Amino acid sequence: MEAGIALLLTGACADLPAVVHAIDLAKRTTGIVHAVFRAERNADKKSKAFGETRGEIISLATGLGSQEGVSIHTHILERLSGEPLIRFLCAQRIFCLVLGVSDQQAFTRKTAWIDLLRKQLAARNNWYLPVLWSVVVTPWDDPSLERIITRCKQSAPGSAVMEMLIDSLRKDRYNFNGIETK
């Protein structure tokens, strides 16, 4: 089993930048991304948006991954924290954790959470690395978004996967405070 990158997906607006970043990182390392979702809860099952968002993200990640030569493995965990996540990280030989956050406050919380996770992993007998790498991705600002769209158009003009990515990016032309961007 080869080591890989864990991409924690929550269905939030910052998942898209996290997907692109994880795939870019995997191209430079092992070529394997483990996209991880939490299991649906009863409240989630009532909302079609959760399932549709999950499906769109998986479809986008697998399409972009295959375009870039990166294997995407999808996993559903009971929780994206605690014992289920720790067992997963150890079993899949994860060396890097990638996740998206929507703002600076969430960035601070997730950074503290990752530090705690590292301590928990270090205490495990079956943890094999001295440290877990992590990347916490924030949403794109307008110039970054335009660079990503331009890069997508140049890398595979006419590709259905790239068109889907560009449509997703254009559809979400809102900075994550609800203010439309131009």
Image (spheres, helix red, strand yellow):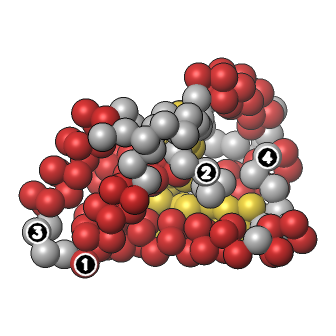
Pointer 4: what residue? 81
Label 4 element class: loop
- Give the percent coordinates (x, y) of residue 107: 61, 27
Q: Which residue lies under the disc numbered 3?
A: 157
Q: Is residue 149 above or below residue 100?
A: below
Instruction: Label 3: state its secondary structure.
Output: loop
Image position, residue 17 (x, y; %): 43, 46
Q: Going from the N terminus, do you reach mark 2 or mark 4 first? A: 2
Identify the residue at horizontal 33%, vertical 71% (top origin).
164
Q: Earlier in the sequence, mark 4 or mark 1?
A: 4
As measured in the structure, the alpha-carbon distance from the residue carrying label 4 to the one carrying label 3 is 39 Å
Q: Residue 68, how many percent across, how many down?
A: 26, 64
Residue 160 is labelled as 1
Q: CA distance from mark 2 to mark 4?
A: 17 Å
Q: Position of residue 66 (x, y in %)?
A: 31, 73
Mark closest to the chain's N terminus, 3 or 2? 2
Q: Quadrant of residue 152?
A: bottom left
At label 3, the amino acid type is: Pro
**Residue 128 relative to residue 65: left or right:** right
The answer to whether residue 18 is visible is: yes
Closer to the chain start, of discs 2 and 1, is: 2
Which residue is labeled 2 in the image?
12
Q: Circles 4 and 3: CB distance less than 8 Å?
A: no
